[in-house]
Image (cartoon, rainbow, N blue to C red):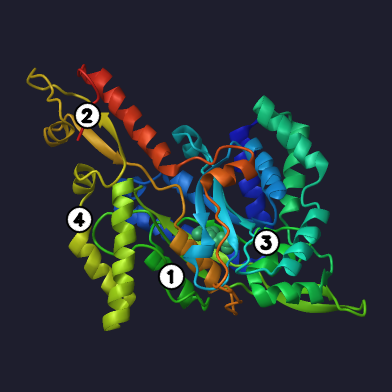
């Protein structure tokens, strides 16, 4: 029998093998990531594993896929549901990107701490928004929706096996093998000739729209290993002659605690794709659609901490626009000014999430524990362990999208946007899109309740 987490781990592994075969530069990225992680572990010892065991981090991947319709998104949710992955977070890339990125997104991932520890595989999943008149006029919208309605991304057999795995929580070996085979195949790059005229029509609006709606299939467009020192990884990849995008997205490098998520990537490489021209002839063209990305994960921020992060991003923009200068330098200076410099201060100011645990061996002198969290920490009754950020960042995601567009595309801002939000997306997915902050908060609260029970406190300690 394969339980859901075993299916998830096996799927991530097989997908990684497939992607490595098809996109060799990805294999280089995985190799260099492993080397960097081993070096960090050697240099820092147990401290290197503060945000995840080395076995988790080594196996850790996220992927990204893009679909065209609510129905397709709903099917994706069934496949990932079989792997114990739920939709978490709503991302509106239309607003976060300056070029034409007509999608809204969520991420499928495990949500329980034990499940994340077993295998944290997650997939950033975007859905095209043909109804947004800033990108698509009525005629193109109708043509696009008709094209999308006619294609089938996932074979019925795959969906039936997915439903069974979700309902029963597991699959027998033979069915698991079949499910994994079909699931990986659904995300391979198709060799079917694409309609060149149609693809180019969409490309004029947005390369993302063409990648999604210009073909009859979907594909995984990147797979991202996790690294413990992304600055070092960036340096080593460059040394190996791989051209990386010119920045690391997200927080800057600094001496304080790592928070949220830092990401960088190399540009999609041109890959041969058969194309059918208007006269029916098939020729060999080339498209740049699949790329490589790598990420370093830090501590999850509370709503308050996140508001600070978003505010700092705006200030970086303002300062860079006003005074010019290197964004990384500006960011680092602002970070040093505004962000708590230690985990302890992050916790005390309520800006980041931690789980709290009684320190074994207390009480030493028989005195009762204090009631407040700060005192419990200061007097060594309780220790805080950071909760790692398991989600994505809209600005960074937009940056990743954009770094792979050679053309801005077009968008007509005289039309007003169609509104999408988390509730709308829940309806489309057919299941509740969970709020990431609530998930972290629940985990933190549970640990505080456990502290109260273990130390015989009248109630969970508060900051
Ligand atoms: C998704 C880009 C976002 C990330 O890591 O922020 C992303 C895409 O290119 O489809 O994967
Ligand atoms: Ni990504």
Residue corresponding to mark 4:
341
Q: Residue at x 20, y 63 (%)?
A: 336
Residue at disc 1, secondary structure = helix
> How many other residues sit within 10 Å of disc 2, few (<14), some (14-19) or many (≥20)?
some
Q: Quadrant of the C terminus?
A: top left
Work out whether residue 427 or residue 203 is closer to the camera in this orientation and state it.
427
The image shows residue 71 at horizontal and vertical percentages of: 72, 47
Determine whether 151 is above or below 379 in the image.
below
Visible residue check, residue 31: no
The image shows residue 104 at horizontal and vertical percentages of: 57, 56
Residue corresponding to mark 1:
234
Work out whether residue 342 or residue 47 is closer to the camera in this orientation and state it.
342
Please state which of the two labelled residues, at mark 2 or mark 4, is closer to the viewer: 4
> In the displayed structure, does residue 258 sit left or right of residue 275?
left
Cα distance in 3D space between marks 3 and 1: 36 Å
Visible residue check, residue 44: yes
Mark 4 or mark 2, which is nearer the start of the sequence? 4
Mark 2 or mark 1, which is nearer the start of the sequence? 1
- In which image quadrant can residue 446 be found? top left
Determine whether 278 is above or below 58 in the image.
below
Cα distance in 3D space between marks 4 and 3: 45 Å
Please state which of the two labelled residues, at mark 4 or mark 3, is closer to the viewer: 3
Residue corresponding to mark 3:
130
């Amino acid at each position: 029998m394969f339980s859901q987490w075993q299916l998830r781990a096996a799927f991530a592994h097989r997908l990684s093998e497939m992607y490595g075969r098809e996109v060799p530069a990805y294999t280089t990225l995985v190799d260099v990531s492993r080397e960097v992680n081993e070096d960090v572990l050697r240099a820092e010892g147990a401290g290197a594993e503060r945000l995840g065991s080395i076995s988790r981090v080594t196996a850790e991947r996220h992927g990204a896929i893009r679909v065209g319709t609510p129905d397709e998104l709903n099917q994706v949710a069934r496949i990932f549901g079989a792997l114990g992955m739920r939709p978490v977070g709503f991302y509106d890339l239309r607003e976060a990107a300056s070029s034409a990125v007509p999608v809204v997104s969520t991420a499928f991932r495990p949500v329980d701490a034990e499940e994340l520890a077993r295998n944290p595989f997650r997939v950033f999943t975007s859905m095209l928004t043909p109804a947004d008149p800033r990108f698509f006029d009525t005629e193109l919208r109708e043509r696009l929706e008709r094209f999308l309605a006619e294609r089938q991304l996932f074979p019925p057999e795959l969906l039936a096996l997915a439903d069974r795995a979700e309902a029963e929580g597991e699959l027998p070996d033979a069915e698991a093998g079949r499910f994994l085979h079909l699931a990986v195949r659904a995300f391979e790059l198709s060799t079917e000739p694409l309609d060149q005229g149609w693809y180019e029509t969409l490309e004029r609006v947005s390369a993302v729209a063409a990648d999604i709606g210009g073909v009859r299939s979907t594909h995984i467009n990147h797979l991202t290993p996790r690294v413990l020192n992304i600055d070092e990884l960036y340096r080593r990849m460059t040394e190996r002659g791989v051209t990386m995008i010119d920045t690391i997205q997200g927080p800057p490098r600094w001496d304080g605690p790592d928070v949220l998520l830092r990401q960088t990537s190399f540009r999609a490489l041109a890959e041969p794709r058969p194309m059918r021209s208007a006269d029916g002839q098939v020729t060999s063209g080339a498209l740049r659609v699949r790329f490589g990305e790598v990420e370093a994960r830090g501590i999850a921020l509370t709503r308050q901490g996140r508001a600070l992060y978003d505010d700092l991003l705006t200030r970086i923009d303002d300062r860079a626009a006003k005074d010019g200068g290197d964004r990384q330098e500006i960011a680092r200076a602002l970070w040093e000014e505004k962000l708590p410099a230690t985990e302890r201060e992050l916790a005390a100011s309520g800006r980041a999430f931690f789980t709290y645990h009684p320190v074994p061996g207390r009480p030493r002198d028989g005195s009762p524990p204090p009631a407040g969290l700060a005192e419990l920490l200061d007097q060594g009754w309780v220790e805080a362990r950071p909760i790692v950020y398991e989600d994505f960042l809209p600005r960074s995601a937009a940056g990743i999208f954009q770094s792979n567009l050679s053309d801005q595309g077009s968008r007509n801002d005289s039309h007003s946007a169609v509104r999408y939000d988390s509730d709308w997306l829940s309806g489309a997915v057919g299941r509740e899109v969970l709020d990431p902050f609530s998930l972290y908060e629940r985990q933190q609260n549970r640990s505080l309740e456990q502290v109260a029970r273990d130390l015989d406190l009248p109630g969970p300690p508060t900051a």
